[in-house]
Image (spheres, rainbow, N blue to C red):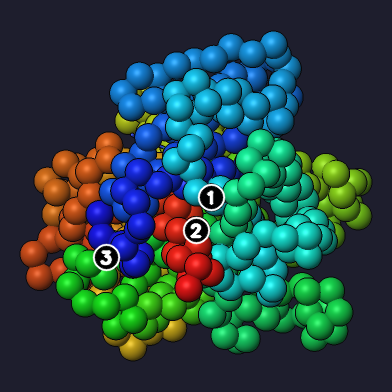
Amino acid sequence: MNSTLKPKQADNDAILVINCGSSSVKFSLIQPATGNTLLSGLAECLLTDDARIKIKIAENKDVIALASPFDHQVALDALVTTLKQQNLTDDIIAVGHRVVHGGEYYAEPTLIDENVEQTIKQLSQLAPLHNPANLIGIKACQNAFASLPQIAIFDTAFHQTMPEKAYLYGLPYHLYKEHGIRRYGFHGTSHYFVANQAAQQLNKPLADCNLISAHLGNGCSVTVIKNGKSVDTSLGMTPVEGVMMGTRSGDVDAGILIHLIERLGYSSEQLDKLINKESGLLGLSQLSNDCRTLEQAMLEDNNAQAKLALEVFCYRIAKSIASFSASLTDLDGLIFTGGIGENSDWVRNEVVKQLSLLNFALCPEKNQATRFGKSGNIAANSARNCWVIATNEEWVIAEQSNALLQQLAR
Ligand code: ADP
């Protein structure tokens, strides 16, 4: 894998990458010099009776059962114990943390000190589910690895290059100036990674590339990249705006929320649950938020509601891609990534067939064959490039943490 890193001092030096979500912790131990992942895993359903942790060391997958329900700290303690048992702790030179919201403060990888921690805490107002969990991960790793630098890689950082006209809402300006109400965008690490990979395919520097990337997972976002920089993205101040997602609504007329409060008596808590947890693919299909389940129901059982949900999902993505083309005068290609983007040939086809005005068209065989971790260009001959690229946010966090360490050592 190509990297923008300076050469590393020692091949076996490794970065521990931590991604603490509200009910999960993803982790990997990555050697930036070789690109090897020495250990990876996931603790999920934290704080419920189903809490569990899976740790993969080389090709062996260990499922460690812990007294449930257990929390982030217990999961991280289990990780540290495994790292020690495997004699891997001595090679760790830093811990890189995914932090969801960096507001307008952080556009670059940042060494975490007390001030940075305070700012991440303050920004919890904008990401109440994510930043507090990220801080738990930071604290736990500070306890476990007191001598190691802790580095924050912000999900919002890549989008800090958006111009005012893209990040401002049509709301009174003082709400932005006094309360930070603006669009920030998320999934920045993923969009940055796949854009770099596309630049390599094009054999030109990222700074010369104009791309649109669609990260389609449980959360979904579309980003437009002009001369290598994010100039607009579909997620906004919170991860609800933009295209429809697994359980999140995406764009709705803001007046609907007032209607729900005034006419149907919704509380803020109920609204929050409605737009974040009960909408999107799940809400429309009344079946599942999982794209695989819906495709199966549509294709095998002729389930009309599943088909409808998937059609709305794809139309909204196509509209978002088409509208973002307004930011560009030239377009090198479209990228699909994330669990759905990397695996669903049906969704890719349904999206791209609505983009023929932009000269997008897929080769059906290549589209069908490029799944389950395979990357490649799936465009039809003479159509505009359309790549499937498996994202690797962990790799970016390791790479950028390592680059910061080298910069600080100079
Ligand atoms: P997250 O945003 O939680 O990281 P992922 O990027 O893992 O999520 O994406 C999860 C989504 O990917 C789910 O909707 C899942 O159904 C979908 N997905 C995974 N594999 C396939 C597949 N083979 N076909 C269609 N959708 C898939």
Please give the name of the residue rendered at 72% of the width and 51% of the height, measured from the top-left corner: 131
Residue 198 is marked as: 3
Q: Which residue is mark 1?
A: 94
Quarter of the picture containing the N terminus is bottom left
Describe the element under mark 2 as helix, strand or loop: helix
- Image coordinates for residue 303, horizontal then vertical, percent: 43, 29
Q: Is residue 57 left or right of residue 374?
A: right
- Image coordinates for residue 151, horizontal then vertical, percent: 59, 57
What's the distance in space between the residues labelled 2 and 3, CA to CA?
Answer: 22 Å
Residue 254 image-quadrant placement: bottom right
- Image coordinates for residue 201, horizontal then vertical, percent: 19, 65
What's the distance in space between the residues labelled 1 and 3, CA to CA?
Answer: 28 Å
Residue 53 is marked as: none
**Three-letter residue code for mark 1:** Ala
Describe the element under mark 1 as helix, strand or loop: strand
- Image coordinates for residue 279, horizontal then vertical, percent: 64, 43
**Three-letter residue code for mark 3:** Ala
Sequence-earlier tag: 1 or 3: 1
Q: Nearer the viewer, residue 227 or 83?
A: 83
Residue 401 is marked as: 2
Residue 363 image-quadrant placement: bottom left
Please give the name of the residue rendered at 59% of the width and 19% of the height, measured from the top-left corner: 52
Q: Which mark is nearer the camera, 2 or 1?
A: 1
Q: Is residue 161 left or right of residue 375?
A: right
Sequence-earlier tag: 2 or 3: 3
Q: Nearer the viewer, residue 18 or 235?
A: 18
Cβ atoms at labels 2 and 1 below 8 Å apart: yes
**Three-letter residue code for mark 2:** Ser
Few, some or many C-alpha atoms within 10 Å of disc 2 (few <14, some 14-19, many ≥20)?
Answer: many
Q: Mark yes or no: residue 294 visible.
A: no
Q: Nearer the viewer, residue 154 or 341?
A: 154
